[in-house]
């Protein structure tokens, strides 16, 4: 009897996974975003890190770029957060592509990761995608 | 016999380079008083022969013709201009002369007439020769010619558009220029390419618009600083839409993305090439087929 229950549960779990994969993957399609990237990298100076990012739209977007940028320690403590604007250069208007680098300073020797949300918007539709970077150590 | 004499008489012209022969034709057109139609016709025969023997050798002519079309005629100021800038200058002078005195008779009318006939025949022969070559390498010359029959001259985007500017931009930014597609769908016009040279990547985006149908697509080329940076790029797509298309030595992954199509190739090291936007699958595959390298 226990074997039957275990087998039924196992079959149910496999089927659930099979159904869930396409459902979650559907979120990967985007009307406005074609591709995007965000990586966390070491700078040349002690404590210097930088985010390299890019976003390409499916069309001439009304605006696109970085929506929010958050820096965490490896323990999950938020140490830096900012929103993208045209003033800080993280957002561009009337373009199909935007990309660049954002430099900042943290405690040398500590480990950090970043959460970068990029977006592309027309006058009526806006989509976003969040990148979680690798954890790296800030240079001494 | 007469033919042999003719060939011997102008044998020295066969030894000249194509550029030098073209210079002779230009000099002839600039100085009608120094006429030597026999020599000019021999020059044209030599050029025609070389074009037939070596179609690739006239590649530079195709690029030059296209450059002239884009810089002289396909501009707002080009409306109504004649085929050669020198003709414009002359006609401008004539207009001024006419403004001063409309009764003034043209000088050397007979000589002008004979010279004009010779130049017209030469121009037709040379243009025919170049036209066949240009058509062979992808310029839709006949498509453009068809649109010259209207009362006013204007350019309309034609099938099989070829943009040497795209290849130039590839080369200027140290990308393999063979990777620039050579064919684009009918009705699309290329806008100014956007080039971004960043710390960890360089990318070029070539936007194409079809204003009448409200459609858009782009060609984007990437060069990354490392395979890791390349792998970090995420493409949006609808699961189940993925298929592969191979042309030459490149296999593109083609996906659907909310009504848009994205075709991407990568060497898995540094380079990525994408074609994306409001495109049909057959047109996307034809663009891919036109990529060399």
Image: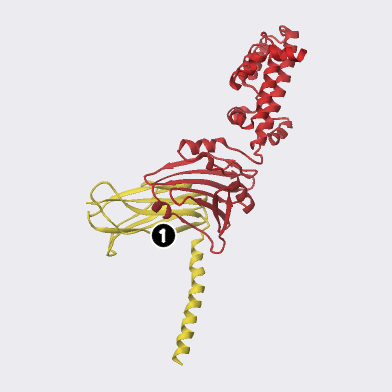
> Which of B69 and B175 lies nearest the eye of the viewer?
B175
Expressed as whole percent of the image width and height from the top left, the position of residue B161 reads 62, 39
- Height in image: B74 above or below B207? above
The single residue placed furthest to the bottom in the displayed view is A1
Residue B204 lies left or right of residue B209; in this view the side is left
Residue B149, image quadrant = top right
* Crowd around label 1: few <14 · some 14–19 · many ≥20 (10 Å): some
Where B36 falls versus B193 (above or below)? above
Report whether A5 appears left or right of B215.
left
* Residue shown at 29% from the left, 64% from the top: A76
Q: Is residue B245 left or right of residue B133?
A: left
Seen at 43% across and 42% down, the residue is B196
Q: Which chain is red?
A: B
Relative image position of residue B135 (x, y in whole percent): 67, 35
Q: Which residue in the structure is indicated by mark 1?
A: A130
Q: What hue does chain A carry in this figure?
A: yellow
């Amino acid at each position: 009897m226990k074997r039957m229950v275990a087998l039924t549960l196992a079959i149910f779990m496999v089927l659930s996974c099979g159904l869930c994969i396409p459902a979650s993957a559907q979120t990967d399609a985007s009307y406005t975003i074609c591709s995007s990237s965000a990586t966390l990298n070491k700078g040349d100076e002690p404590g210097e890190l930088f985010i390299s990012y890019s976003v390409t739209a499916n069309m001439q977007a009304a605006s696109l770029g970085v929506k929010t940028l958050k820096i965490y320690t490896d323990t999950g403590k938020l140490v830096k957060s900012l929103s993208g604007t045209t003033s800080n250069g993280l957002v561009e208007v009337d373009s199909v592509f935007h990309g660049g680098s954002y430099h900042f300073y943290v405690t040398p020797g500590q480990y950090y990761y970043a959460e970068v949300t990029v977006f592309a918007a027309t006058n009526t539709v806006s989509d976003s995608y969040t990148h979680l970077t690798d954890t790296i150590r800030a240079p001494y | 016999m007469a033919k042999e004499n003719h060939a011997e008489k102008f044998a020295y012209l066969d030894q000249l380079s194509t550029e030098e022969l073209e210079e002779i034709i230009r000099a002839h057109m600039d100085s009608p008083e120094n006429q030597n139609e026999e020599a000019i016709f021999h020059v044209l025969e030599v050029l025609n022969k070389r074009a037939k023997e070596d179609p690739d050798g006239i590649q530079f002519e195709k690029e030059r013709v296209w450059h002239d079309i884009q810089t002289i005629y396909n501009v707002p100021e080009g409306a109504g201009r004649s085929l050669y800038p020198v003709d414009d200058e002359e006609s401008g002078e004539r207009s001024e002369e006419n403004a001063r005195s409309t009764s003034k008779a043209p000088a050397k009318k007979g000589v002008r007439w004979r010279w004009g006939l010779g130049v017209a025949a030469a121009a037709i022969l040379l243009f025919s020769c170049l036209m066949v070559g240009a058509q062979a390498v992808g310029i839709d010359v006949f498509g453009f010619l068809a649109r010259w029959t209207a009362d006013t001259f204007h350019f309309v985007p034609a099938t099989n558009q070829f943009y040497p500017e795209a290849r130039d931009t590839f080369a200027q930014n140290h990308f393999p220029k063979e990777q620039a597609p050579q064919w684009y769908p009918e009705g699309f016009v290329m806008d100014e390419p956007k080039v971004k040279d960043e710390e960890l990547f360089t990318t070029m985006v070539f936007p194409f618009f079809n204003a009448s149908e409200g459609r858009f697509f782009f060609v984007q080329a990437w060069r990354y600083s490392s395979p890791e940076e390349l792998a970090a790029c995420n493409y949006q797509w609808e699961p189940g839409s993925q298929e592969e298309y191979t042309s030459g030595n490149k296999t593109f992954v083609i996906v659907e993305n909310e009504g848009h199509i994205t075709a991407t190739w990568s060497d898995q090291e540094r380079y990525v090439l994408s074609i994306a936007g409001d495109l049909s699958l057959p047109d996307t595959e034809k663009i891919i087929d036109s990529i060399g390298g």
